[in-house]
Image: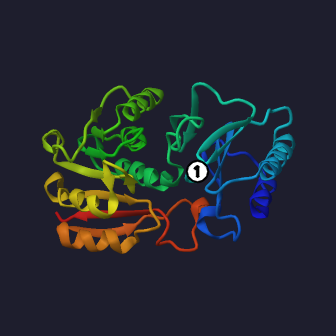
Amino acid sequence: MQALLQAIAALDAFPSDAQRLFHGRGGRYPGCEQWSLDLFPPVFVLTSFAPASEAELAAVHEALAERVAALAPGQALSWVYQCRHEGQLETRLMAGAVPEPHEVSEQGARYRVHVLKGQNHGLFLDMAEGRRWVREHVAGLAQPERLRVLNLFAYSCAFSVVALQAGAGQVVNVDMSAGALATGRQNHALNGLTSGASFLAHDIFNSWGKIGRSGPYGLIILDPPSYQKGSFVASKDYARLMRRLPELLLPGGHALLCLNTPKLGVAFLQDQMAELAPELRLVQRLANPPAFADVDEDRALKVLLYRRAD
């Protein structure tokens, strides 16, 4: 784990925004593939995808303590360890305390996170460039207040927050989890967004009627889980989303397709889109945040931007 310890020692300042600090999963640090380190200020979150020894955790604690003492004298170290090894799931507060409520920032927006509960923390840090594109795209429209956005698999509605901040007129947030959408409502309130967003706790595969009635949309965001037993399996269910895009999307509108699994590459999305939604043309693949650099970009997060012809 030497590369992880070196990355901690090399920190010359603590970022004010939530972000990844070390991405072993990208394969650029041989022997460190199991480790990732995030900062949800003021809390560090170390994640291991394999069992970690107490000696390894002690080494991380020492490295973090030394860096905090050097960069922020008098500030207490707070960090959480999470193990995601199958059959050995664990989340443990290792030092300090986690604020309650715990609120972090990214690109001028505020979000509620929960690093001690569940595997997902309330904000997917690897999607930062996707949120940046949405903000810049909406702000660059001649009449952003006329834009209707459909945010499918909205989770805690971070895309909705940035779209409304940039001036979008309406965002429809859809997710099966009422709890996630409740956090989404809190995120809107944190940012002073009191209108423009709707929240629909709904299984889209049961009925598209409610979603269709609010359309058509100028921007559709699809950020589904890659595998969620009983609700969504990307390899077979993504096609069901693609088939709906032409009827839901306005001419000239955009669709942002997201896929985060190393098992399916870019061609999986491109080939199916060409077959199932030929009215939409690929514009670009958005770059991932530099902190998430990967030796094989086909295994990394894939965010593809499509546009429907005018």
Can you give x and y, in whole percent of width and height, for residue 152 in the image? Answer: 30, 46
Name the residue furthest front.
Answer: 87
At 61% from the left edge and 59% from the top edge, which residue is drawn?
291
At 50% from the left edge and 52% from the top edge, which residue is drawn?
128
At 39% from the left edge and 60% from the top edge, which residue is drawn?
259
Can you give x and y, in whole percent of width and height, for residue 20 in the image? Answer: 62, 52
What colour scheme governs how the chains and residues are painted in the rendered image of this protein? Answer: rainbow
Tell whether 152 sits left or right of 35. left
The amino acid sitting under disc 1 is Arg
Q: Nearer the viewer, residue 236 or 212?
A: 236
In this view, 12 is above or below 76: below
At 33% from the left edge and 60% from the top edge, which residue is drawn?
234
Tell whether 97 sits left or right of 172. right
Can you give x and y, in whole percent of width and height, for residue 39 in the image? Answer: 65, 45
Q: Nearer the viewer, residue 260 or 302?
A: 260
- Name the residue tied to disc 1: 84
In this view, 28 is above or below 138: below
Q: Nearer the viewer, residue 3 or 246?
A: 3
Q: Secondary structure at mark 1?
A: loop
In this view, 218 is above or below 265: above
Quadrant the N terminus occupies? bottom right
Tell whether 21 sits left or right of 131. right
Residue 242 in which image quadrant: bottom left
Circle 1: is it few (<14), some (14-19), or many (20+) Cα within 10 Å? some
Can you give x and y, in whole percent of width and height, for residue 105 in the image? Answer: 56, 38
For the image, the number of numbered tags is: 1
Quadrant the C terminus occupies? bottom left
In this view, 307 is above or below 73: below
